[in-house]
Image (spheres, coloured by chain):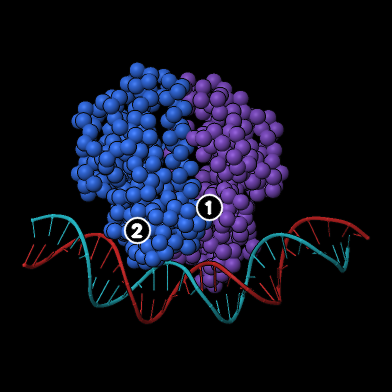
Chain colours: A purple, B blue, C red, D cyan
Amino acid sequence: MPSMTHLPALPDEPDCMSCERRHLCLPVVRDDIGSAVAGSVRAVAAGDSLFLEDETFASLYAVRSGAFKTCVGASPQRGRVTGFALPGDLLGLDAIDAGLHRCQAIALQDSEVCELPFDQVEQALAASGMLQRRFHQLMSREIVRDHALMRLLGQRQAGARIAAFLLGLSERALERGQSGTALRLPMSREDIGSHLGLRLETVSHVLTRLRAAGTLAVRLREIDIVDMQGLRGVAG
Amino acid sequence: MPSMTHLPALPDEPDCMSCERRHLCLPVVRDDIGSAVAGSVRAVAAGDSLFLEDETFASLYAVRSGAFKTCVGASPQRGRVTGFALPGDLLGLDAIDAGLHRCQAIALQDSEVCELPFDQVEQALAASGMLQRRFHQLMSREIVRDHALMRLLGQRQAGARIAAFLLGLSERALERGQSGTALRLPMSREDIGSHLGLRLETVSHVLTRLRAAGTLAVRLREIDIVDMQGLRGVAG
DNA sequence: CGTAGGATTGACCTCGATCAAGATTAGTGG
DNA sequence: CCACTAATCTTGATCGAGGTCAATCCTACG
């Protein structure tokens, strides 16, 4: 498990062999098979959109650095944050069905993505059984994650929702070779609340309660998981 | 839009050309391209499981008749109903990732499924760009549906959840050539509640309220949508 | 006819939404 | 470098929707 500092600068060229998220990203497979998906790197400033809702779908995007939130519906009123994408995650999978992006992707910080034209992806998949398998696994994993979140949202207790959310972030940080206990949240309390079906005040209340219980150390968006076992207990 | 009675008997042989859900099901594409996925029909009695959680994954299943619920976690306590599968739906997409079924599929009534060995599916996808496209659309649609449900679960109002749930059932009934207003629910109040994150008593309370408001006519599992516009209003 | 599982109804109570300030931080321009 | 401002986060109060508990009714099935 390589230790790494937060979000180092990445080269402008789509040199996937040297990309720090190779093991998570689709393009790694392209290197294995030699047949290329010619992805180009694109920079997105914090607050800008990578794509909008109802925009025509042409490419998938692999996050190389930074973080995104995906929103559906008019933001931030009736709309909801459907998920957060970290380096190595794919954006746009939900657009394959109708050929239209069904959500809006907004950068939470200055970010870089690798654009993967979908027609090229399809050709590459047909050419390689291994790549095809990997791609289907990625889509399947997205479904699994959504089901886990649905289970979470079905849970009524606010504490359990937030605990499980933090545990998810911890796990994803570990997958990326970062600390699983010292988290730096890229999103606001309002984003978290929108994602979990809670008001931002409730998020605050719960975090305060977990801090008072000695489970967390909270300083704005820097959160340390002090009592991992206790947090799992709260999550159920 | 052909009118059809409820769930007619289907032939035992996997004759997909004559299957009434051709336009919804994956195998229809196999007929288009001639290269076959040799699916065999399997009968599942009401209450029986098609597959269990953590069972090794080998095949996808296309529902031909009847209905299924998919559950995750110990049922029915901590567990939740993640979704309902109707004729034409695919079961098992979430198992591709880890090679293990991540949920349990339980027949809500006597049902028939078409078993599709996944290795054969993969071969067929690689051989046909059209089939590949169709398959990816199916997976993508699953993701889109999950996101819609997540949005629903984020919504706190029980009435809105149930109204949206009924509207979804209505839409799916229409897609299958059935009435969009006279619904026959295959699942119990408890299943609905587990799916929507509500107690079964709350489901009852809400249905009673919607009946009193003249929006629905409820007689156990037979529900008529009297005021479709009003129901949409409740759903938000 | 009798039993059991599913559904309805009603009373009470908890937990999160809501409202309202206030505190802290970050960002901006002089 | 330091006000000034806007955004974000926190804290505390009250209120209401939904959970919980408990009793009853209804339907299906043997």
Q: Above or below — where is A178 with respect to C21?
A: above
Answer whether residue B118 is visible to the viewer in this image. Answer: no
Q: Above or below — where is A224 with respect to B123?
A: below
Residue plotted at (31% across, 51% down): B185
Specify few, some or many for label 1: CA neighbours under 10 Å numbering under 14, 14-19, or 20 or more: some
Q: Position of residue B9 (x, y in %)?
A: 21, 36
* Identity, as a three-letter code, of the amino acid under mark 2: Ala
* Identity, as a three-letter code, of the amino acid under mark 1: Leu
Residue plotted at (35% across, 44% down): B179
Position of the N terminus of chain B by quadrant: top left
Q: Above or below — where is A236 with respect to A11?
A: below
Q: Is residue B206 left or right of residue A77?
A: left
Residue plotted at (44% across, 26% down): B132
Q: Which residue is mark 1?
A: A169
Q: The numbered mark 1 sits on a residue in which chain? A: A
| Badge number at residue B217 | 2
Q: Position of residue B133 (x, y in %)?
A: 46, 27
Q: Secondary structure at mark 1?
A: helix
| Badge number at residue A123 | none
- Place residue B209 in its image quadrant: bottom left
Q: Position of residue A111 (x, y in %)?
A: 67, 42
**Viewer-nearest residue: A140 or A81:** A81
Q: Secondary structure at mark 2?
A: strand
Asked if labels 2 and 1 touch by Cβ distance under 8 angstroms, the answer is: no
Q: Position of residue B46 (x, y in %)?
A: 21, 47
Residue plotted at (59% across, 40% down): A54
Answer whether residue B140 is visible to the viewer in this image. Answer: yes
- Place residue C1 in its image quadrant: bottom left
